[in-house]
Amino acid sequence: MKKCFIAIALVAILGGCKNTVDPNNVIQKNFGGNRVLRKMTNAAENKNAVSGSFFLFCGDVNATTESRTLLMFAWKMNNGSYQISSLPLTNVRVKFDDKIKSPTIRFNFKEIVYLLGSGTINNTQDYIDKYVNYAELTVKESDWAPDVQLPFNKTSAKE
């Protein structure tokens, strides 16, 4: 009796799994593999915030400024259109390969993405901001824009 109940429970569990969609399919469909790059450039993003608190005659005001460099790029989606996206330079890895025909990008996702349920992706940039761990660009060394410099590795005019 016990074995029969376990067998029925397993069949019910496995049978119920047929209708679920693997979240990897959504990821692979929209972001998987090497995607062709059309254009890339760098841009500075500045975030300013001011906060304060007061009580009677005492108070405190704090101001913060955060600046970071973004890599903006257009990559080819499955439907043939190009999506314009951005990532901080700290989340970009560059691989030089002079044998490739056109530059490509490959997204690497955080582990949590594989645990989430499937769904539709309404805003591609929000999805990239939340779930992309890093992106690997494969470019010819001559295609890498000379003005894209890491903030900690700026060269002088003499070099």
Image: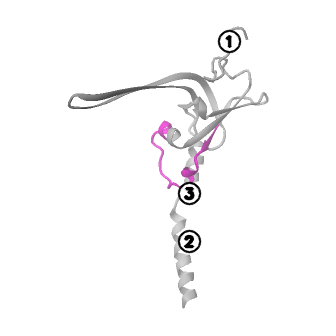
Q: Where does the image place residue 149, in percent across and percent down from the top left?
A: 64, 21
- Closer to the chain start, of discs 1 and 2, is 2
> Residues at badges 2 and 3 in contact (C-beta under 8 Å)?
no
Direction from residue 47 to residue 43 in the image, left or right: right
Q: Residue at x 56, y 31 (%)?
A: 88
Q: Amino acid under label 1?
A: Ser
Q: In which quadrant is the N terminus drawn?
A: bottom right
Q: Nearer the viewer, residue 16 or 137?
A: 137
Which of labels 1 and 2 is toward the front? 1
Magenta residues, start to end: 106-126
Q: Is residue 40 magenta?
A: no
Which residue corresponds to mark 2?
A: 14
Instruction: Give the answer, above or below, for where 73 lies relative to 24.
Output: above
Callout 3 secondary element: loop
Farthest residue in the top direction? 158
**Mark 3, residue position:** 22
Quote the CA–CA distance across marks 2 and 3: 14 Å
Q: Nearer the viewer, residue 113 or 15?
A: 113
Gap in angstroms between the C-alphas marked 1 and 2: 63 Å
Q: Position of residue 26 (x, y in %)?
A: 55, 49
Coloring applied to the structure: one colour
The type of residue carrying mark 3 is Asp
Compute the Cα span from label 1 to label 3.
50 Å
Residue farthest to the right, as pictured: 99
Within 10 angstroms of label 2, few (less than 14), some, or many (20 or more) residues?
few
